[in-house]
Image (tube, rainbow, N blue to C red):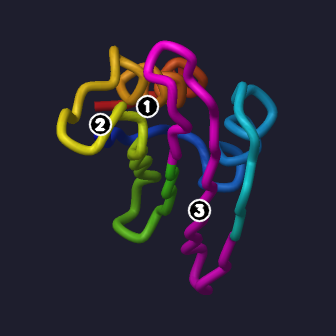
Amino acid sequence: MSKNSFNISITPLEALNLVQDQQNATLVHEEFHDLGQNRFTGTQIYEKYYFRSKNRAALIIIIDNLKGVTNVRAISTGSSEGLIFNFDWGAADNFVSSVEKILEKYIIE
Protein backbone atom coordinates (compact mmCIF):
# COMPACT_ATOMS: atom_id res chain seq x y z
CA MET A 1 0.00 0.00 0.00
CA SER A 2 1.12 3.52 -0.75
CA LYS A 3 -0.55 6.86 -0.05
CA ASN A 4 0.00 10.57 -0.51
CA SER A 5 -1.83 13.75 0.43
CA PHE A 6 -1.32 17.28 -0.89
CA ASN A 7 -3.17 20.56 -1.45
CA ILE A 8 -3.84 22.14 -4.84
CA SER A 9 -4.99 25.52 -6.16
CA ILE A 10 -7.89 24.32 -8.35
CA THR A 11 -11.39 23.10 -7.50
CA PRO A 12 -12.14 19.46 -6.72
CA LEU A 13 -14.11 19.06 -9.96
CA GLU A 14 -11.31 20.53 -12.08
CA ALA A 15 -8.82 18.19 -10.40
CA LEU A 16 -11.00 15.10 -10.85
CA ASN A 17 -11.50 15.96 -14.53
CA LEU A 18 -7.75 16.37 -15.08
CA VAL A 19 -7.00 13.05 -13.40
CA GLN A 20 -9.69 11.27 -15.40
CA ASP A 21 -8.42 12.74 -18.68
CA GLN A 22 -4.78 11.82 -18.02
CA GLN A 23 -4.83 8.68 -15.85
CA ASN A 24 -3.56 5.58 -17.64
CA ALA A 25 -5.85 3.09 -15.89
CA THR A 26 -9.44 1.88 -15.99
CA LEU A 27 -11.92 4.05 -14.10
CA VAL A 28 -14.20 1.66 -12.20
CA HIS A 29 -16.13 4.10 -10.00
CA GLU A 30 -16.67 7.84 -9.74
CA GLU A 31 -18.84 10.12 -7.66
CA PHE A 32 -19.04 13.85 -7.01
CA HIS A 33 -21.10 15.63 -4.37
CA ASP A 34 -22.06 19.29 -3.99
CA LEU A 35 -22.41 19.80 -0.24
CA GLY A 36 -23.57 23.39 -0.53
CA GLN A 37 -21.82 26.60 0.53
CA ASN A 38 -19.18 26.07 -2.21
CA ARG A 39 -17.99 22.77 -0.65
CA PHE A 40 -17.47 19.70 -2.82
CA THR A 41 -16.13 16.18 -2.47
CA GLY A 42 -15.37 13.59 -5.12
CA THR A 43 -13.97 10.11 -5.37
CA GLN A 44 -12.50 8.12 -8.24
CA ILE A 45 -11.38 4.50 -8.14
CA TYR A 46 -9.07 3.10 -10.80
CA GLU A 47 -7.72 -0.37 -11.53
CA LYS A 48 -4.58 -1.31 -13.41
CA TYR A 49 -2.65 -4.53 -14.02
CA TYR A 50 1.07 -4.38 -13.23
CA PHE A 51 3.18 -7.05 -14.92
CA ARG A 52 6.09 -6.54 -12.54
CA SER A 53 3.95 -7.43 -9.49
CA LYS A 54 1.75 -9.88 -11.43
CA ASN A 55 -1.33 -8.37 -9.86
CA ARG A 56 -4.00 -5.73 -10.24
CA ALA A 57 -3.68 -2.56 -8.21
CA ALA A 58 -6.45 -0.24 -7.12
CA LEU A 59 -6.04 3.53 -6.88
CA ILE A 60 -8.50 5.49 -4.74
CA ILE A 61 -8.52 9.27 -5.16
CA ILE A 62 -10.47 11.48 -2.78
CA ILE A 63 -10.57 15.21 -3.45
CA ASP A 64 -12.46 17.81 -1.40
CA ASN A 65 -12.36 21.42 -0.29
CA LEU A 66 -14.09 20.96 3.07
CA LYS A 67 -11.38 22.86 4.99
CA GLY A 68 -11.15 25.85 2.63
CA VAL A 69 -8.41 24.45 0.37
CA THR A 70 -8.63 21.64 -2.14
CA ASN A 71 -7.01 18.53 -0.69
CA VAL A 72 -6.08 15.42 -2.66
CA ARG A 73 -5.63 11.99 -1.11
CA ALA A 74 -4.37 9.14 -3.29
CA ILE A 75 -4.17 5.59 -1.97
CA SER A 76 -3.02 2.52 -3.89
CA THR A 77 -3.57 -1.01 -2.62
CA GLY A 78 -3.74 -4.60 -3.84
CA SER A 79 -0.51 -4.46 -5.80
CA SER A 80 1.60 -6.92 -3.84
CA GLU A 81 2.33 -10.40 -5.08
CA GLY A 82 1.35 -13.36 -2.92
CA LEU A 83 -0.26 -13.82 0.46
CA ILE A 84 2.81 -13.81 2.67
CA PHE A 85 5.05 -11.14 1.21
CA ASN A 86 3.80 -7.57 0.82
CA PHE A 87 6.24 -6.63 -1.95
CA ASP A 88 5.01 -5.01 -5.15
CA TRP A 89 8.18 -3.92 -7.04
CA GLY A 90 7.15 -0.26 -6.68
CA ALA A 91 3.76 -0.59 -8.39
CA ALA A 92 1.79 1.09 -5.55
CA ASP A 93 4.22 4.03 -5.36
CA ASN A 94 4.07 4.42 -9.13
CA PHE A 95 0.26 4.42 -9.16
CA VAL A 96 0.01 7.01 -6.37
CA SER A 97 2.70 9.26 -7.86
CA SER A 98 0.80 9.35 -11.16
CA VAL A 99 -1.83 11.56 -9.49
CA GLU A 100 0.80 13.95 -8.18
CA LYS A 101 2.40 14.16 -11.64
CA ILE A 102 -0.94 14.99 -13.26
CA LEU A 103 -1.67 17.76 -10.74
CA GLU A 104 1.92 18.92 -10.07
CA LYS A 105 1.58 22.43 -11.51
CA TYR A 106 -1.33 23.13 -9.13
CA ILE A 107 0.30 21.84 -5.91
CA ILE A 108 0.57 24.43 -3.12
CA GLU A 109 2.20 24.31 0.30
Which comes sooner in the sequence, label 2 or label 1?
Answer: 2
Q: Position of residue 75 (x, y in %)?
A: 39, 46
Kind of residue at badge 2: Ser
Q: Are marks 2 and 1 in contact (CB under 8 Å)?
A: yes
Residue topped by disc 1: 96
Q: Position of residue 76 (x, y in %)?
A: 41, 42
Q: Residue at x 56, y 69 (%)?
A: 41
Kind of residue at badge 1: Val
Q: Residue at x 29, y 36 (%)?
A: 2
Which comes sooner in the sequence, label 3 or label 2?
Answer: 2
Magenta-tinted stretch: 32-59
Q: Is residue 25 above or below residue 13?
A: above
Which comes sooner in the sequence, label 3 or label 1?
Answer: 3
32 left or right of 66 in image? right
Determine crowd level at label 3: few under 14, some 14-19, many 20+ residues with C-alpha closer than 10 A.
Answer: some
35 left or right of 88 in image? right
Residue topped by disc 2: 2
Residue topped by disc 3: 43
Q: Report the magenta stretch's main SS.
A: strand
Determine crowd level at label 2: few under 14, some 14-19, many 20+ residues with C-alpha closer than 10 A.
Answer: some
Residue 106 can be seen, yes or no: no
Q: How far apart are the two marked residues, 3 and 1, measured between alpha carbons?
A: 14 Å
Q: Are marks 3 and 1 in contact (CB under 8 Å)?
A: no
Q: Is residue 68 above or below residue 49?
A: below
Total count of labels: 3
Q: Is residue 69 above or below residue 36?
A: above
